[in-house]
Structure formats: C-alpha cells, structure tokens
Image (cartoon, grey):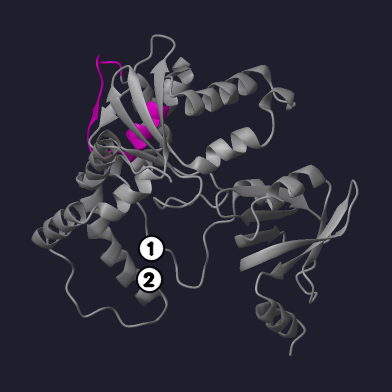
Amino acid sequence: MSRGPSVAEAAVCTGVAVQFLRTPKVRTTLDRLPRQLVERLVEAGLPALDDPMPSEDDIRKITLDLIANRDEIVEGLLTKIPILYEPAGGARFWTSDHPIVREGSTPDDRRGVKDLGVAFYAPISSDLLLGLVCPSILAKLTDAPIERLELSANRKARLLALRDGLLSGRPVPITDDQVMDFNLKQVGGSERFVYAHEDAFEPARTWLKAHPEQRAGAALFSVGRMGSGPPRPEQFKEGQWLVLYGRDNWVQLPIGGYDPQRSLRQAWTDQPALLRSAMRHAPFAEAQIYYPEGSEMIRDINVVILERGPRTRFKLVPSDPGMAQLDAMLRRGG
C-alpha cells in the first residue's frame, strides 16, 4: 500500500501552489485572455463577444477563487519528486514578484501541472532552490546507465548529479552559469520586480535589452490564432520524428519512410534500442508525428514491430481494435 503525503509535503506543495496563483502575473493573464479571444474572433470574421471585459474587481475575485480552489494544483504537485539545488560557486538565487518558475521538457513544451515532463522551481533562500520534478524525468535518467552514454564530461556530470539528487534527496550543487540561468527565468517570468541579496542586476539588464518584449510582462499563456496549431518544435524542423507519450514517460526518436498519404502508418528507425525502451511504456496515450510537410497527432496508440534489425520497421495502430479498423477505413477513404 502506498503511503499518502506527509503533512510537511502537503504544506510545501500548498505553499508553492498559493505562491504561483497569488501574483500579479496571474491577474495580468486573466485580464489579457478575454481581450485576446475577442481579437481572434474578429480576425476569423466572427462577431465579437457582447459581454464586457472583466473589471479589476472581477479579476481580483477570480484570483481569490483560484487560490481557494487550489486542491487540483496541489494534487498535481504532490505527484512530483522534490529536489534541492545549492550554488557551488559565488552566484546566488534571485526571486521576483512571480517566484515560481514552471518549466516543460517535452518537445511541445507542455506546461500543465499534471503533464509529463513539467517541473516547478521555488527559491527558498539565496543559497537554496526547491524543485518539484515530474517522475518522467527520473525515469529518463534511470532507463539507461548514464555512465555508458556518449556525452560530454560536463553534461554527463550534470545528469549524474541530477539523478543522484532525485534518488538520495541530497542538495545538488550547480554552477554559477546554472544559477544565472534560473535567475534570468525569474526576470522573464516577473511582472515588475526582481529581488536579490545584492545589487548585481547587470545580467538582467543585458537580458532585457536582448528581449525587449519582456519589459511589459508576458501572460502565463495566450490565445492562439484560430485554425492554427502550436509552433513546430525547433528540433523537428528537418527530417521525420515520432514522439510517444506513455503513462509515465515520453520518448522522441528519429524515423524515416513515413508517408502521410498511405493508409498504414508505417515507418522505420535506426535507433531500435530507443524504440524498445519506449515500448516499455506502452500503450501510449498520444503519438505525434512530424515531417517536413506537416504533423499528425494520434491518441491511444500502440507500436507493432514489423521487422527487427539496425533499421527497425514498425507501424502505429490504435490500441482499441475497433478503432484500428475504423482508422484503416478512414485512411483508405472509406
């Protein structure tokens, strides 16, 4: 029987949730989203909404409701693995008026609290940073021995330290560059203010000169244009790629031979070991296929190996047999 969260764990996750929801950034987002929705409706040739935009009082009440009904966010945070970071050099952590940094690690940059690959970071003091990390990140770090991977010495050392910190609970020492990388995320996520233990904000000023659009403060998310999906991930600009999202992990691998016009979703990969590793997480809640002409997304999918070897051939089929038959009929044009 798995144990429930301790009082301390629940208190920490509640504190992170409240800190994430109570900031000016959330109120800015609540103010901008309805306006963006109206703009997108007008762009699409549809009539604008008749309802008035939310007032400051409305936004304040919505924010209070979000904080009062924070249980779902707390539940999502409780599924994550805590980790501590400490500076190995002279750099120190900053904080801001939106101190909780949220990061996604999937190719499509998912940011939901319960999405795979999402982590939250909260500065506790100038020399201690708390991370709440998705278990899928630990799964990736333990799927294959890091010691045997062909990586640069610095990258291998960072991954080993991260894996050991997640498993042991001991603070992970990080370099001045890594500390500053986090600090600049505080700058990008803040609404107006950044705080530090000393007046040494020149890196923030340099970063803002390179990213002037961030001076106005960005919303947590925005309304995209109707009929268009999210931007294609930069790493998939060339070639063909498959991303498989399992129950507790996700894997991306290069593929070839995929023809979106064919009725059977067949392809090959020259990384059979990575495909075998991915299949341990089957069936998959979602598969994303990227190719130069576009992309596809399929839900509830399985991988069937057709031919093993250095270039392994496989096909994607719906997990449900009935859906597999329907899918084949639709792709054949009836």
Q: Neighbour class for label 2 at 10 Å: few (<14), some, many (≥20)? A: some
| Residue 72 magenta | no
Q: Is residue 109 above or below residue 300?
A: above
Magenta-drawn segment: 182-200
- Please give the name of the residue rendered at 24% of the width and 42% of the height, measured from the top-left corner: 14
For disc 1, the marked residue is 223
For disc 2, the marked residue is 40
Q: Is residue 101 left or right of residue 244?
A: left
Q: Secondary structure at mark 1?
A: loop
Specify the amino acid type for callout 2.
Arg
Specify the amino acid type for callout 1.
Val
Marks 2 and 1: CB-CB under 8 Å? yes
Q: Is residue 308 left or right of residue 144?
A: right
Residue 179 at x, y percent in the picture: 42, 21
- Number of the front mark, 2 or 1: 1
- Please give the name of the residue rendered at 34% of the width and 44% of the height, measured from the top-left corner: 4
| Nearer to me, 302 or 259 | 302
Q: Is residue 260 above or below residue 326?
A: above
Q: Is residue 57 above or below residue 311?
A: below
Q: Is residue 224 above or below residue 109?
A: below
Q: CA distance from mark 2 to mark 1?
A: 8 Å
Residue 276 at x, y percent in the picture: 76, 48
